Image: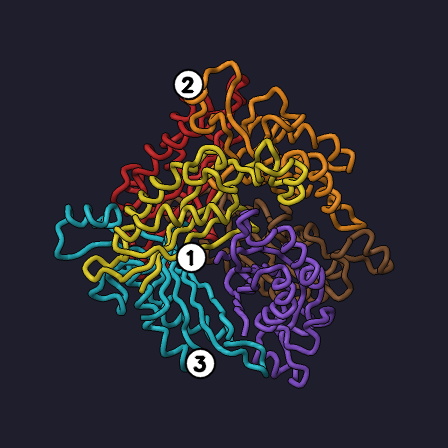
Chain colours: A red, B cyan, C brown, D orange, E yellow, F purple
Amino acid sequence: MMFITRRERFNAAHRLFREDFSDEQNLEVFGKCSNPNWHGHNYTLYVTVKGEVNPKLGFVINLKTLSILIREKIIDKLDHKNLNVEVDFMSGKIMSTENLAIAIWEELESSVLALGCQLHRVKVVETENNYVEYFGS
Amino acid sequence: MMFITRRERFNAAHRLFREDFSDEQNLEVFGKCSNPNWHGHNYTLYVTVKGEVNPKLGFVINLKTLSILIREKIIDKLDHKNLNVEVDFMSGKIMSTENLAIAIWEELESSVLALGCQLHRVKVVETENNYVEYFGS
Amino acid sequence: MMFITRRERFNAAHRLFREDFSDEQNLEVFGKCSNPNWHGHNYTLYVTVKGEVNPKLGFVINLKTLSILIREKIIDKLDHKNLNVEVDFMSGKIMSTENLAIAIWEELESSVLALGCQLHRVKVVETENNYVEYFGS
Amino acid sequence: MMFITRRERFNAAHRLFREDFSDEQNLEVFGKCSNPNWHGHNYTLYVTVKGEVNPKLGFVINLKTLSILIREKIIDKLDHKNLNVEVDFMSGKIMSTENLAIAIWEELESSVLALGCQLHRVKVVETENNYVEYFGS
Amino acid sequence: MMFITRRERFNAAHRLFREDFSDEQNLEVFGKCSNPNWHGHNYTLYVTVKGEVNPKLGFVINLKTLSILIREKIIDKLDHKNLNVEVDFMSGKIMSTENLAIAIWEELESSVLALGCQLHRVKVVETENNYVEYFGS
Amino acid sequence: MMFITRRERFNAAHRLFREDFSDEQNLEVFGKCSNPNWHGHNYTLYVTVKGEVNPKLGFVINLKTLSILIREKIIDKLDHKNLNVEVDFMSGKIMSTENLAIAIWEELESSVLALGCQLHRVKVVETENNYVEYFGS
């Protein structure tokens, strides 16, 4: 079993808040991340796929194919966007890094399987000090 | 003459656009950076100060003092903010990295002088692929 | 299950040695890290916590709370200190990165549990070429 | 159980291709990585070893010993070399990062065991966007 | 005057040598970089352009335009190539990082002028330990 | 004129203080950096040399020669040392990063000249947030 990881990046605005909270409640729970005027990040996404090495070609998955998959299904929908209001697969969810990682997993899982591999990990780095990792339920 | 640089960081939303342009014009000139719903970045700010080394204390400037100055005058106003709508010193300006660097220079210049040094450079890194540097007019 | 990691940093002096070894023995076993006059590092600490995503708030743990916990229990005791002589929880131990990681785990484990999560990993990076990871006994 | 990781680096040329493919087939399958005139990378190798912490010395393994082992068995054979034509343990294999990671594992496994530890992971970073990890069969 | 820098990357093979030297002489002068079977690097290129900030648009130069220019004139010719044998503008030159930086400057200078700016610096990073900078003759 | 930079690293202990100050005065002026029990850093040193490109060999200076020079004159004296008490060229000086940069310049200047180049810049990075640069008096 071999694990291969592809890094992609996106720059986006977001806000941490609950609609049914007042601004004061949101500030208390989510801090400055709840700013109603939004803030943003340079997000880094690491997608790790696992599988057997193809003995004929020497690779687990064609990285070009994996990169195009991630770009079409994830990056094109997130880059230079407002994550709270413009992303179909985040609709109705709290825009936390945790929920974003789960949603990215769900968007990618079956497509990676269709390529003959398994999705192993989705890692989303929000700042140099914080990141989350999701390995599926 | 010695040059000393302090790094500070802020995460913010912004948008590149002109109010007197249509959305189509803004898209044509500023590309996806003109998204009306905002996007954002992890900005890194490098402030370089120059001066003589104080022979008694061995430093050009107390870095703690410099850091507090940058935080009070710049970071507290930019971090987790919308750079287009919430920053007094960017009001009425196109929110480009270039204009941001000039504005930061103008906010810091006299305070650095008051500390007995000269501001040498303001460097703003927007992504790992792009940064601007301003050395004063 | 979601994994979230917080990075914190500290700069400290230390020395690798055994009191019951001669200087020659310490030099032979621990190399230049045994220098009796100390040396030091910019240490980077990564603390990974795992737990369920709170469905109401969208996060595993409030990162601000986690950061304060790590600072109070670890960083304030290590930063700008001599790790061999000034840190209560390293007293009487060989000041290796391995032992430091175990001690940090023991300092944090119950407090992380009290926050409703589990400590998953303590990673201590000593130089760009060396790091250790501890996942509990 | 403690995990300790050593980073080493090597700069090398390589090419992704099958001898029994035409240039067109290689281009189609391996893309620009199949360039018959070679291309190259600054590779970064992370070797992770696991074991008990020696209670007398405070470490899992002497990092100097581990570094020398990796240099003698791996880096000296790969650095400033053509990975396809000059490396004994890659002879007759497709020079993919995956196959390189497996070969490095096989070169190191028994020597690490002889030092009283177990090899846990070989990670090879080819570019800032791609890396593979191998944990043994 | 504002300075703006764009980073681009390319992975390539090369060799440091003189044709009129024997292999022994090349080894003596250029060390392992003279390996006749080539080696390679992940090169990072930083192109710095200077100019006035356009008061109407807020930028010195459209970064998209600059990026396309660098890709068409430089990256497409260098990436996944053998720098000694496949690059028209390096033909007949010793393939040192210094000569590469000068050649990149000469390829870009007039095109940057045509965009209303001046080329200020070409920086080529070969490894994390070495880089060259050229500011024009 | 070409500029070439070599990076070297050293890990060391130090303390910011004046002998004729009380501990309280040192704490007030130098903060936690004055800790009498020392602290330490992973220092990164960048040495930039300028000169003409040798038309026969394609380089400004043999990087191997430059690296050996820096190691013999600087790194061997600083690495895994206490910068206040074990470094001849820092004797009697306040161990600030500024003074260290000046001292490194003075140690290297004539040797670089003897190699046919000029020393251009000494840059010392103390943490990811602070660095100093010295270009000679």
The amino acid beneath tag 2 is: Glu
The amino acid beneath tag 3 is: Leu
Q: Pinpoint the chain carrying mark 1.
A: E
Frontmost of labels 3 and 2 is 2
Frontmost of labels 2 and 1 is 1
Q: Pinpoint the chain carrying mark 2.
A: D
Of residues D37 and B13, which is closer to you in this image?
D37
The image shows residue D54, relative to residue F71, as above or below, that is: above
Residue under label 3 = B115
10 Å crowding of disc 1: few (<14), some (14-19), many (20+): few
Q: Residue at horizontal 44%, vertical 80%?
A: B115
The image shows residue C19, relative to residue E30, as above or below, that is: below
Residue C72 showing in the rendered view? no
Q: Secondary structure at mark 3?
A: loop
Real-space CA distance between mark 3 and mark 2, rounded to the nearest whole angstrom: 66 Å
Both labels 3 and 2 in a single chain: no
The amino acid beneath tag 1 is: Ser
| Label 3 with label 2: CB-CB less than 8 Å | no
Real-space CA distance between mark 2 and mark 1, rounded to the nearest whole angstrom: 43 Å
Q: Residue at horizontal 34%, vertical 36%?
A: A74
